[in-house]
Amino acid sequence: MRIVVKTPNKQYNIEIAQLDTITIDSKVAIITNPKVSGLHINYLLSKLKAKEIQIITLPDGEEYKNFDSINYGLDRLFDAKFDRNSVLIAFGGGVIGDMTGFMASIFLRGIKFIQIPTTLLSMVDSSVGGKTGINNKYGKNLIGAFYQPEAVYIDPKFLETLDKREFAAGMAEVIKMAVMFDRDFFVKLKKDELKIEEIIKNSVELKAEVVNKDEKEKGIRSVLNYGHTFGHVIEKMTNYSKYLHGEAVAIGMVMANRLAVKLKTLSTTEEKEIADTLKQNNLPISYKIKDVEEFYEHFFADKKTLNNSIKFIIPNGIGHYKIVENIEKEIILDVLKDFS
């Protein structure tokens, strides 16, 4: 199946199918991590034809999504005499995809790259739309660029070796999109009626439609941050080591839903429906906040905060969204106290 992303400056295809032969008439570097390389590199190499192929292996994990990893990768590209015609392939999950895209955006002021995601989260969300970047001590994804790939190849075969926790983390992003945009999709997820290929297809179509309308998150694309404003703080406060990204987003969705209930845009019945669906997909739905004021202050390091005003994405009933700003501090603290 083919889905087209069309931004003002770039059009590219997302192919959802078993990987076909990829022919590239230049040097190629596959950016990956040890786990994905050990499981799948031979499969990818059997499908890839290029003038020269380098394999650059970066450490696995959110805590390695930093300038040290980027500099290591860039040094390997310079050592191998890559040029502006060379191509990078992101072969891994969201961390590898984000770092590879960022590396491509700054190497010689920009070279081409391709996404071949291997986790459910990266297939349904992070590989689509051109968000690239790294973390620093101030927060998650605060350094980066909007830089679109040349193509995205989604092969569900890679999910055969994905562990249950990583699969669940991907389902958090799927549920996020259903809650924001498509009640029928949510109901099918709740009833467990869909095959994985249908889940990927529906999710990617929703994401592509949003990116086509708003590449650089000036409007509707910010809705995809549902669960992320709270989730990014959770990741930061646990040093990116306790929760997978999707797990933190799931908890963040629960917190955003509590805010929605207090603002009367979501019923308590719908709040429970969403929490139950997250839980049945093996996702965490609780978190203990040790210091409510400290948690609140971390919101202001988020890149989505403007003019000292926190933007929250909340459901307006299941299948619809609302963007809220300038919420009184006491209301937000009241939400956080429910988790303390």
Image (spheres, rainbow, N blue to C red):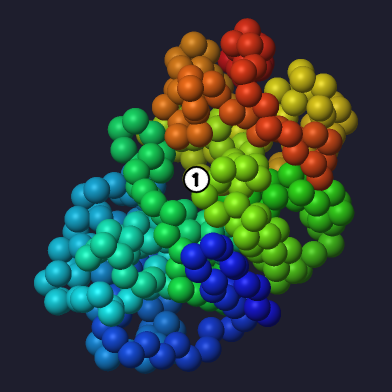
Taking the image as shown, residue 231 lies to the left or right of residue 258, namely: left
Q: Residue at x 42, y 59 (%)?
A: 147
Q: Secondary structure at mark 1?
A: loop
User: Residue 54 at what x, y percent from top left?
Assistant: 25, 78
Note whether residue 164 is visible.
no
Which image quarter is the C terminus in? top right
- Identify which residue, 147 or 190, lies in the foreground: 147
Q: Is residue 28 left or right of residue 21?
A: left
Please state the horizontal and vertical placement of residue 237, each as a whole percent of the image. Answer: 42, 27
Residue at image location 64% in from the left, 39% down from the top: 226
Number of numbered tags placed on the structure image: 1
265 relative to 92 in the view: left or right:
right
Residue hosting label 1: 244
For the N terminus, the quadrant is bottom right
Asked if residue 17 is positioned above or below residue 10 in the image, the reply reads below
Q: Residue furthest left?
A: 79
Q: For the residue carrying disc 1, how many other residues have a C-alpha within 10 Å: few (<14), some (14-19), or many (20+)?
A: some
Q: Is residue 308 visible?
A: yes
Task: Residue 207: name its quadrant.
Answer: bottom right
Vertical side of 262 occupied by 208: above or below: below
From the viewer's perspective, is 148 left or right of 56?
A: right
Residue in view at x 59 percent, y 83 percent: 18
Picture residue at 33% right of the left edge, 90% below the top? 25
Question: Can you name the residue that lies furthest to the front here?
Answer: 8
User: 210 or 250: nearer the eye?
Assistant: 210
Quarter occupied by residue 48: bottom left
Task: Give the percent coordinates (x, y) of residue 324.
Answer: 67, 27
Q: Amino acid at mark 1?
A: Leu
